Image (spheres, rainbow, N blue to C red):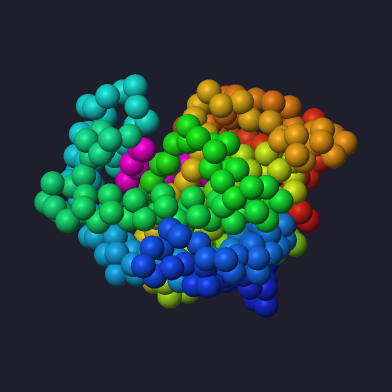
Amino acid sequence: MDFTVVHEEAVVPVIDLSPLLDPRDPSAARTEELPVVRQIGKACEEWGFFQVINHGIPLDLIEEVLATSRKFFEYPAEEKMKVGAQAREGDHSKIPTGYNVYPPCKWDMYENLYYGAGPSECNAFPEDLPQFRMVVEKLRIFLAKMVEFIESLVSQSLGLPPHFLTELNGDRIEPFKLLCYPRATSQHEEIGAWEHQDSSCITVVGQDESGGYQVLKNGKWVDIKPTKGALVINIGDILQVWSNNRFRSAVHRVVNSKERRRCSFAFGRIPSPDTIVTPLPQFSTDINCPAAYTAFPYRDYTVKKTHNKTHPPTTPDDFVTISIYAIHKMIFNNNAM
């Protein structure tokens, strides 16, 4: 199904976290959580997306990471591939890291630098951008703390204890991607990332001012307009399964700019490959509600999703989604209705 209409009036919720953060310790929540918890719960139920401002991460650090990554992506292809080659010579038992680019025959059209969650020496960095490694690793530390805080608010919005999701996903992996989308010079290059849902629990995205990040709402695309200092949070497939469809993983995409290349970063929290994912009893058996999904190992899902990237289906409708584990086949994302 091709959705081309952009909903100009709908606005993705922007949530101010400043009432909750102690400026002396951004990881310490205050007691005024309830209104924000309600806002987050409503955004997760109605959108699967929201933006946060005053989140405690230095804005100059975010801007420096985006600016430095833009410098890297402007390198000649042969120079960028050197970073990918370094990563492939590392420990192959770990998540592959380094530079990747999808060729024009693939559905998606962007470049990325992928960093795994293991020790920093497993990751490859450009040798002639010495500050790059420092700012990336510093930002990842901030993002990990912020996501844990967001998880506590999401847990409470589900009626769970604050640390529930963090403890449930205790052996989590935290991949980090820096992405660059080409300037659209033809109709073929208009879509940078095809419509999809994230296979994470929660994903955080930081974007430059180029725009083009869109979420599907009631059958229409809504621009997630860049907001100064804001980070975008979205619910992933795993949280959709855990909550037994109470929170939905929203369909989203990236439309390439005709004016400039678009740079962004994405930080996700995903289960370890051997984790068995299934609806939580709090949202199924404990309340006499049928489970919407069969239990499955997370590895199984990621293998199928990766195959979509390496062997793209003929049509968008053939892409693997979380619905393959649905007990009753139906449209699971109400944002697509």
Q: Is residue 251 above or below residue 279?
A: below
Task: Determine the main secondary structure of the stretch shown in magenta.
Answer: loop
Q: Position of residue 172 (x, y in %)?
A: 48, 36
Q: Is residue 64 magenta?
A: no
Q: Position of residue 280 (x, y in %)?
A: 71, 35
Indicate the quadrant where residue 318 lies. top right
Indicate the quadrant where residue 63 lies. bottom left
Q: Which residue is at the front of the view, 225 or 316?
A: 225
- Identity of the residue drawn at 54% across and 38% down: 167
**Residues shaded magenta:** 104-117
One can see residue 223 in this view: no
Please indicate whether residue 91 sits to the left or right of residue 188 in the image: left
One can see residue 274 in this view: yes
Q: Is residue 226 above or below residue 97?
A: below
- Identity of the residue drawn at 41% across and 41% down: 175
- Identity of the residue drawn at 47% across and 46% down: 268
